[in-house]
Amino acid sequence: MPLTFDNRFVSELPGDSESSSRRRQVLGACWSAVQPTPVAAPRLLAHSREVARAIGLTLEDVAAPWFSQVFGGNALLPGMQPYAACYGGHQFGNWAGQLGDGRAITLGELVTASGERHELQLKGAGPTPYSRTADGRAVLRSSLREFLCSEAMHHLGVPTTRALSLVGTGDPVVRDMFYNGHAKEEPGAIVCRVAPSFIRFGNFEILAARDDLALLAQLVDFTIARDFPQLTGDFLDRQTLRAAWFADVCARTARMIVQWMRVGFVHGVMNTDNMSILGLTIDYGPYGWLDNFDPTWTPNTTDASGRRYRFGQQPAVANWNLTRLAEALLPLFPDDSAVQAGLSRFQAVYAAEYDAMNRAKFGLLGQHEGDDDLMRDGYALLYAAELDYTRFFRALGNIGASLSAGRDTIAGTAMVFTSTDEHLDALLGDVFYDAEKRAAQGEALLKWLRRWHARVSAQDDTATARRARMHAVNPKYVPRNYLAQAAIDSAETGDVTPLHTLLDVLRTPYDEQPTFETFAGRRPEWARNRAGCSMLSCSS
Ligand code: AMP
Ligand code: MG
């Protein structure tokens, strides 16, 4: 079936007058026309069948030779109009000027029969005017991580861009993984990512920084019309509509961060150019997943000194980023009341949804005095005892109907315990990373578990209902860094079966999958300090 493209971004917004990919400042335009640079031997390594189906492609389409040619950057389909977007951004707290799609090239905006919009964007498809000193390419390890994680995030219920395909290019790419003088050749790959819109905070910031207010207003109104059509009917005057739009961006961003906190995701590079206007997780680089609960953790070695983008800091950084967006939009409003109202909305939505999310994680119904202390003390113990974040909450959901000193019903069987260790093993299983911390915190942990159990036992609930509720928000499977690294190690030797298996497991992350129990294991010791497992850089 032919695909339909309407390409509104390029047909409604001004483009660059120059058409080469010579690196340059692009003024008075939102995009530059650019063709993907062909690669030697495109080979499909993986695809998402859900995304393929959503955009109207069949299994035969995906298997056809044209598919890897198009999504490897060697051919275009009728109706595609490739471009790279112009944007700026604040990187690590500083204004960085023009950045833009240095290696991302949108192929076109596809519209399905039911009217859904899907922008198809290649990442790693060659240089653009925004490539600065870099090559426009991406290595297999980083492309595989983006492909895998964005699909996993979707299945976990976290707002995200999606990934259609992972295509090996057959061309080597030279990277110095830790910027320490050890550059080497790595296999290249291209992800085709998919989202209704790839507009970022930085698309607005660059226009404000250049004082191009007419184009800034045009981009805002375009974004509202194309990406927020649900808002347009409600407000007749433009000021109110723009204010409502900014507040909606703030609310969406708050909801996205709440979901990151729920599943233990650390983005790693929350620069304003990596913030989607739709509140989607975007630009998977040196991201990571909490193994042991540690709010100070960041996977990004490039950020190791300041830890600006550590897990626990993400809500504050989102707020900071929204404040930068607010500053960029300020010239469009008569005073700052509209943007202030939007920023307040971020605070309100975040506070309410973060609280609801935590209550759900802990299985609490209703609001009781002492709940906040109970949850805060729980997190403090998770940190102090160095417990596995994902496994702990899953284990908590499994705790049965009765729990008293030395006695418990585990999986329906009454059991008696003679020691704290035995009891902890039975209740929590393999959640500890450090024997000394376990010994030091064991008693406190049991005490807290009894306190929690007393609280949930007092609510109108059954252990079975509580488990179902808790398991629906506390995933069993997340794409832990070491799992992704194992899939990368195999893919680099030509075997993509482990990637396919992992992707399959991550399709139903809340289900028990007894055959794949090992994928729910806590981080093995070999992975504690291994590159790719706990340390990642921006080199990709
Ligand atoms: P990131 O840190 O990946 O969000 O990238 C920041 C900026 O650098 C964006 O403008 C990217 O397009 C650009 N960039 C990153 N890697 C490359 C590359 N290999 N080639 C060209 N541009 C790149
Ligand atoms: Mg980026």
Image (cartoon, helix red, strand yellow):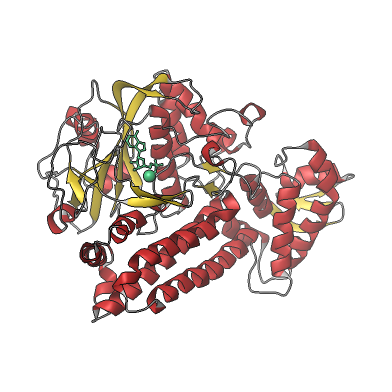
Viewer-side residue, 205 vs 351: 205
Q: In this view, does 274 lie above or below 372?
A: above
Image quarter for residue 199? bottom left
Residue 66 coordinates in the image, percent (x, y): 17, 30
Residue 88 coordinates in the image, percent (x, y): 33, 51
Q: Is residue 400 visible?
A: no
Residue 24 coordinates in the image, percent (x, y): 23, 41
Q: In this view, does 219 lie above or below 333?
A: above
Total labels: the figure holds: 0
Image quarter for residue 230? bottom left
Residue 448 coordinates in the image, percent (x, y): 79, 58
As drawn, the residue found furthest toward the bottom would be 236
Q: In this view, does 38 lie above or below 296?
A: above
Position of 359 compared to 207: left or right?
right
Q: Is residue 456 visible?
A: yes
Position of 382 compared to 285: left or right?
right
- Residue at left 24%, top 49%? 119
Image quarter for residue 225? bottom left
Viewer-side residue, 197 vs 134: 134
Image quarter where the C terminus lies is: top left
Position of 154 compared to 357: left or right?
left
Image quarter where the N terminus lies is: top left
Viewer-side residue, 483 vs 351: 351
- Residue at left 64%, top 26%? 526
- Residue at left 79%, top 52%? 445
Viewer-side residue, 511 vs 536: 536
Which quadrant of the frame does ligand 1 lie within? top left
As drawn, the residue found furthest toward the right would be 418
Position of 378 compared to 266: left or right?
right
